[in-house]
Image (cartoon, rainbow, N blue to C red):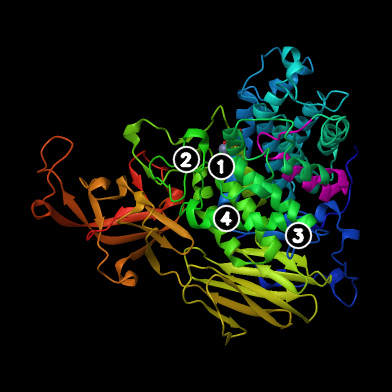
Amino acid sequence: MAKRSEVSRRQFVNSMVSAATVASLPLEKLAWPEERNPATASTVPNSAANSGWRDQGVLNLVKSPHAKLRNVPVHAVTITSDFWGARRQINVEKSIPSMEKLLEANGRMDNFLRLAGNSDAPQRGPVFSDSDVYKWTEAVGFALQSGDRPELHNLADKIIKEVVAVQEPSGYLNTYYVGDRAKDRMTPEVQRWGHELYNIGHMIQGAIAYYRATGDQTLLDAGIRFVDGFLLPNFGPGPDKKPIFSGHPEIELALIELYRTMGDKRHLELVGYILQGDDRIKVPHRGYVYHFCGIPFTSRTHLEGHAVRAMYACCGATDYYLETGDQTYWKTLNTLWDDLASHQMYITGGVGARSDGEAFGDAYELPNFTAYGESCAAIGNMMWNWRMLAATGEAKYADVIERALYNGINSGMSLDGTLYCYRNPLGFDPSSGDRIRNPWYDVTCCPPNLERTFASLPGYFYSTSKDGLYVHLYDNSLLDWRLEDGTGLKVQQKTNYPWKDAVDITVTPEKPVEFTLYLRIPGWSDHTQVTVNGKAVPGVTPGKYLALRRKWEPGDATSVKFDLTTHTIEANPRVVDDYGRVAVQRGPLVYCLEQLDQPEGVRLADVRLDVNQKSSSRFQEELREDLLGGIVVLKCTGAVEDKSSLPAGLYFRYRPETSSKHATTLTFIPYYAWANRASTPMQVWTPVANA
Ligand code: FUB
Ligand code: ZN
């Protein structure tokens, strides 16, 4: 299908403010250009009627009846520099291009080319290899939503052509279930393990991101052909159709975004059917646990099974709720979320305690060294909380997003953007032989997942509501969008967050207008000060949005000062692996100890944290521009317990009087930056000296 050509508002914004622009955007960028002057320009209401493809956010919730908040398009937010600006620049300049080369080198494109007669290479990679290509395409789609990059654009166009070239007339498209394996397509067993619908789900998500960037529907049409031509006529409820078992939830959220994009209600209804489960496909009980599908979603009482599957299922179910308002779904989602927050989530926002089955553990089962914490699962956690936030406008969901994003997701990609963690443990000993960061995995789900997440990040900074604008995340950035009544609005953030406590926010509506600016006050910030035009605002509560309702005038200045006191955090005593230990958190960042930062001869296994001093005086902060891309290092006094007098063997009488301790200085770095130098021991949870 032809590309639509339009003068892009995004291109306009990007020509004015490029990602290379440094932190301080001059104030004139906040001014409205002549043609947007309220006196001369007509306002464009943010209604379904004109929500064109270019203005659809990460989720297009414009018509979702049960969404309290609506997404702001990725192109409307320019993250200019510093924390996420640097990360995103590396993502688009290094990670995404190098991943494409790796996909080629590892046969992911040959899998398609062979079917078109353009390669002799045999099929390579696991059954879900196609999804690697689709997730990469999604990353490019989001990257292009922030501004055109001809090289990436051309490369993605070429890849999309190679993909759609091998779609069968029926609409079926998969590079694994071909030839001798074609007879196995969509058999119950293959629905369990074969990832056919998972692949197509990622294809549809990639296609939508690409469409929202370029208007190019080529891949989207292929996704629709699969669903409308192959899936819907043959599979679904009713005796004339075969049953569906989604196997690895993913198709659910993709189909709902397709429904939001194209408006075909059958796609939403199909998700209702899939989430209900079809008992014509029977799997053993452990299968319903592991796959997190196949039985009614609304019968779930806790998180269990494969963590990525569970998180994606929760995303799909929340999407379904946002469209239908089905209260039984809402009740289940809240039950599962409480389980997540009270029993199952690492302090880093990672999820999935067990390597065995890449799975959730029992309540409070959160081991550190053997933690699975797959990057994809933390991303799934963020995606789910983004949907819960849209449903409610409650800050507790944004707190989880921030926790996962800054820690358990951010750790997944090396600082140079070329190495990735599959697992994100909270303790590490390299003598295990484990290589934690790698350029490539044969199961390479995480790298392109991280790339699409960082590329989509501007879309997570703000939401609109009927009465105003929500600010969820803080970093140097410029929002150029509109309120839901159509009034143009620019919001500039200037900050050195998360290293410094201040965020200056300049609000520039195109004309004076009354609305509510909702500022997220993170749960970790005990004492936050907010002023508007220099006047202190009362009623600031941690873990809530602060509602600033007033008539906003162009140039109104809001300033926020967060409480970045470093805190030691203890876990519920039922988390046995953290008992007698503390983690260190400053602002949104969880910190860790890496062996190579500690004094010579001090082994991490022997260090204790002295918690007798007051938290505020315990840690000295050092801004180190030269280290790990620029970080705040935390130093504090600790103790080293001398165990050298213990005899050889496994068990000894406990004789605390004979153990000697000496003081040392411990150096903490942000967890996300670990394993970016040499491979040395690391730990997040450190025993306290008096435990
Ligand atoms: O099965 C597809 C992906 O591979 C899962 O989401 C990951 O956990 C990995 O197993
Ligand atoms: Zn993964």
Identify the residue at image location x=50%, y=72%: 562
Q: Between label 4 and label 2, give the one nearer the viewer.
A: 2
Examine the rendered structure and indicate whether residue 109 appears above or below residue 655. Answer: above
Magenta range: 243-268
Q: Earlier in the sequence, mark 1 or mark 3?
A: 3
SS assignment at label 4: helix
684 and 307: which is toward the camera: 307
Please say whether residue 256 is one of the residues in the magenta stretch: yes
Q: Nearer the viewer, residue 551 or 627?
A: 551
Residues at discs 1 and 3 in contact (Cβ within 8 Å): no
User: Are the residues at dot 4 and dot 3 in contact (C-beta closer than 8 Å)?
Assistant: no
Which secondary structure, mark 3?
helix
| Amino acid identity at mark 2 | Tyr
Q: Which residue is mark 3?
A: 13
The reply to whether discs 4 and 1 touch (Cβ–Cβ < 8 Å) is no
User: Which of the two labelled residues, at mark 4 and mark 3, occupies the earlier sequence position?
Assistant: 3
Q: Which mark is residue 84?
A: 4
* Observer able to see residue 214: no
Q: Position of residue 111 (x, y in %)?
A: 70, 21
> Quick one: label 3 or label 2, which is nearer the N terminus?
3
